[in-house]
Image (spheres, grey):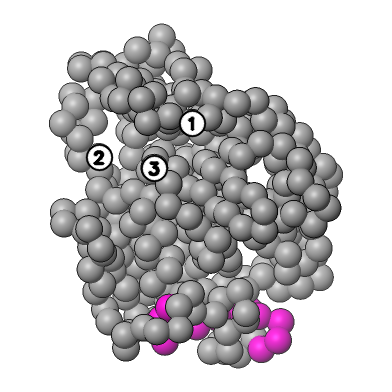
C-alpha cells in the first residue's frame, strides 16, 4: 500500500484525435489528494470538468468516452492507462477538443511526459479495491472475469484469423516499471480492409501509419514493423488498464479476458461497483481496517441490482 501521488510539474502535448482527425492540445496539471483523474474543457466555462469514472461513460465505437457537465471527451483509454500504469492518482487533464490526442497510438508519449514532470507523494493513503468474490461478464464467445488475488494481475487472450496474430495470450503483473517496459509502447491496430468502412462511419479520420499498426492480408504496412511480436495482445492489455481506471481506485484482483474489448471491460467495472459485497476497500484514510464502508465515488452505479451473482450475461 502507498500514499497518493500527483504530478510534480505541469506538462503539455499536442496531436490529433484518432477518430475526429482534429488537432488537440492536452495539458496535465497537479491535483490535490482525493481528486482522481478529472478532465477539464479548456474551451468551456470555468468549472466545466468531468471525473474519469464509469458514471460518466457513454456508448461509443472503438474507443472509450465520457460525457457530462457540458462536454464530452473520447479516446481517453491510452491517457488513463499511462496514468494508472505509473500510479498517478490525482491529476487535472485539460483538453481543447472532444478527443484526447492519439500521439503514436500507444501510451509511450504520455509515459515520457509523466516521467519528465516527475511525481510527488501526497499526505493521504491511496485506497485499493480488493476482490473477495469473482464476477464475470459474458457475451457469446467473448468474456472477462475478475477473481480474488493477492496482487493486481491481467491475463488477456485474443484470437484473429491473421497470420501475424492467430491466438495470443499475455499475463501482466502490475508495476510502474513493468507497464513502462512491457505495455506502454504497444500501439493500436487495425485491418486495411476495414479502413474505408471506418471512414464511412466518421471514425479513424486521424489514423495513419505513424499512430496505428495497419495489417494487410499477410503482414503490416508500417515500414518500422512491430515493436513486439505480440504487440496486438499487449495493446489489449493497455486498453484494459485504461478502461479499468474508470473504477476510480486501483484494484487488487486477477482480470482474465478472452476476446474482450472496451464494451465488456466497462461492463465489468459497472458490475463491480454494483456488487460491493464482492470486494472490500483497503487503505482508506477514514477506516483502514478492511472496511466495507463505501465512499461516494465507489457507491453502486445503479440502485436496482440482483443479489451478487457470480456470472453475469452481457446484453447482446
The residue pinned by badge 3 equals 61
Q: Nearer the viewer, residue 110 or 123?
A: 110
Question: At 66% from the left edge and 36% from the top edge, which residue is drawn?
Answer: 97
Q: Magenta residues, as a range? A: 274-287
Confirm whether the magenta stretch covers residue 280: yes
**167, above or below 290, in the image:** above
> Which x, y percent locates residue 265?
38, 57
x, y percent for residue 56: 55, 61
Q: Quadrant of the N terminus?
A: bottom right
Q: Quadrant of residue 288?
A: bottom right
Residue 73 visible somewhere in the drawing: yes
Left or right: 25 as drawn, with respect to 85: right
- What residue does disc 2 label? 168
Residue 215 colored in magenta in the image: no
Q: Quadrant of residue 270?
A: bottom left
Is label 2 in contact with label 1 (beta carbons under 8 Å)?
Answer: no
Q: CA distance from mark 2 to mark 1?
A: 26 Å
- Residue 19 disc label: 1
Q: SS class of the residue under badge 2?
A: strand
Whether residue 130 is situated above or below residue 151 in the rendered picture: below
Amino acid at each position: 500500500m502507498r500514499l497518493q501521488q500527483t504530478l510534480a510539474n505541469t506538462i503539455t502535448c499536442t496531436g490529433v484525435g484518432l477518430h475526429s482527425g482534429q488537432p488537440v492540445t492536452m495539458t496535465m496539471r497537479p491535483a490535490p489528494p482525493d481528486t482522481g483523474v478529472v478532465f477539464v474543457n479548456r474551451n468551456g466555462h470555468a468549472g466545466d470538468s468531468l471525473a474519469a469514472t464509469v458514471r460518466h461513460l457513454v456508448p461509443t465505437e472503438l474507443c472509450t468516452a465520457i460525457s457530462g457537465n457540458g462536454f464530452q471527451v473520447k479516446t481517453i483509454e491510452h491517457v488513463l492507462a499511462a496514468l494508472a500504469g505509473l500510479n498517478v492518482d490525482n491529476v487535472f487533464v485539460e483538453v481543447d477538443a472532444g478527443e484526447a490526442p492519439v500521439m503514436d497510438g500507444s501510451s509511450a508519449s504520455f509515459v515520457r511526459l509523466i516521467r519528465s514532470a516527475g511525481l510527488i507523494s501526497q499526505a493521504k493513503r491511496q485506497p485499493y479495491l480488493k476482490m473477495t468474490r469473482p464476477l464475470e461478464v459474458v457475451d457469446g464467445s467473448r468474456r472477462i472475469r475478475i477473481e480474488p488475488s493477492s496482487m493486481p494481475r491481467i491475463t488477456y487472450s485474443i484470437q484473429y484469423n491473421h497470420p501475424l496474430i492467430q491466438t495470443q495470450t499475455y499475463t501482466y503483473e502490475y508495476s510502474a516499471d513493468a507497464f513502462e517496459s512491457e505495455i506502454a509502447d504497444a500501439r493500436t491496430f487495425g485491418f486495411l480492409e476495414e479502413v474505408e468502412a471506418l471512414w464511412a462511419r466518421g471514425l479513424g479520420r486521424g489514423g495513419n501509419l505513424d499512430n496505428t499498426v495497419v495489417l494487410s492480408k499477410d503482414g503490416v504496412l508500417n515500414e518500422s514493423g512491430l515493436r513486439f511480436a505480440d504487440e496486438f495482445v499487449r495493446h489489449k492489455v493497455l486498453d484494459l488498464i485504461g478502461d479499468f481506471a474508470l473504477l476510480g481506485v486501483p484494484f487488487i484482483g486477477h482480470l482474465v479476458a478472452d476476446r474482450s474489448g472496451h464494451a465488456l471491460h466497462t461492463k465489468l467495472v459497472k458490475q463491480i461497483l454494483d456488487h460491493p459485497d464482492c470486494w472490500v476497500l483497503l487503505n482508506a484514510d477514514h477506516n483502514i481496517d478492511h472496511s466495507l464502508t463505501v465512499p461516494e465515488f465507489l457507491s453502486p452505479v445503479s440502485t436496482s441490482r440482483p443479489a451478487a451473482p457470480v456470472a453475469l450475461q452481457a446484453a447482446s
